[in-house]
Amino acid sequence: MSYNLITEQMRTLKLHGMVLALENVLTSKQASHLDTVQLLELLLQQELEHRLTRKIDRLKMRARFRYNASLEEVTATSKRNLDPHQLASLSTCNWLTKAENLLITGPTGAGKSHLASAFGNQACLNGYKTLYYNAQKLFYALRMSKMDGTHRKLIAAISKADLLIIDDFGLQKLDDNNRMDLMEIIEDRHGLKSTLVASQLPVSAWHEIIAEPTLSDAILDRITSSANRIELKGESMRKNK
C-alpha cells in the first residue's frame, strides 16, 4: 500500500493526528529506528494529543471568555488578598468535580473578570464544558430567547454546562423575569454543576440586587452553600497599565 493511500485512508477515518505524526516520522527519518510496536505507539499517542488539543480549543471557543487568561499568569499576593494555597487548590479543578461554586468579589479593576476567565480556561484544559456570560448579556439572551421560542433550549444548555461563569453580577437590580430565570438556572445546577459568580459587590449585598425576599433567600442559599470565596482587594490594576 502506497504512502498516499495510507494517509488518504487515515484522513477518511479522521486520524489527522496520525497523518501529521507519520509525516514527521518519515521526514525526520525516525522510522528506521522504530519497530512496528514503537511506531504504532507513537502514532496513537500523537493522535490522542491532537484530539485533546482540538477538544480544548473547541471548549474555549464555545465558552467565549472575556480574556484569554491563564492561572499561571496570576500572582497571588496578600496585597490583592489572594491566597496562593487557595489558588493552587482551586487550580486542580477539584471544586468542579465536587460541583462546588466559586464567588469572586472585589472593587472595580481588581481583576475579577481576568481571574474568572483564567479559572474558565483552566476548566477547559481539564475537559469541562464551560460557558462565560456577562450578567447583563445573559439576561438579555434569555429575554430574546423567549421571543424566538428558544428559551427552553437555552436554559437547558446553560444548566448542563459543567461550569457557568456569570461575570459583572449586580450592576443592576433584577426584574421579575431575571429573577425567575436565575432561580431556574441555579436550581437546575445546584449540587450537580459548578457556578462561578464575579461581582464588584460583596455577597452580603446580593440580596438587595435580586430584590425579592423569598427568591433572594432561595437563590443565595443555593449559590453560597458549598461555595469557595475570593475577596480581591487593592487598587485598580488598570491604573498600573
Image (cartoon, rainbow, N blue to C red):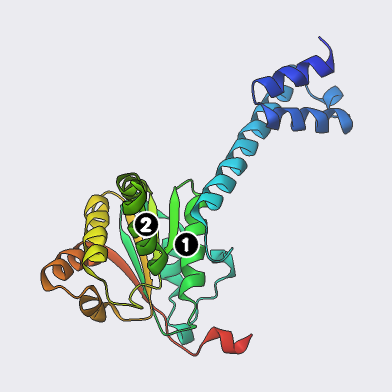
Q: Residue furthest left?
A: 214
With respect to residue 105, does 226 lie above or below?
above
Q: In what quadrant of the picture does the C terminus appear?
A: bottom right
Q: Residue at x 68, y 34 (%)?
A: 46
Q: Which mark is residue 144?
A: 2
Q: CA distance from mark 1 to mark 2?
A: 28 Å
Instruction: Tell me the quarter of the picture where residue 195 sits.
Output: bottom left
User: Callout 2, which amino acid?
Assistant: Met
Image location (x, y in percent) of residue 194: 33, 55
Asked where in the image residue 212 lies, by quadrant, the reply is bottom left
Q: Is residue 35 visible?
A: no
Q: Nearer the viewer, mark 1 or mark 2?
A: 2
The residue labelled by disc 1 is: 119
Residue 130 in sight: yes
* Left or right relative to 185: residue 118: right
Query: Which residue appears at 23% of the width and 55% of the height?
Result: 184
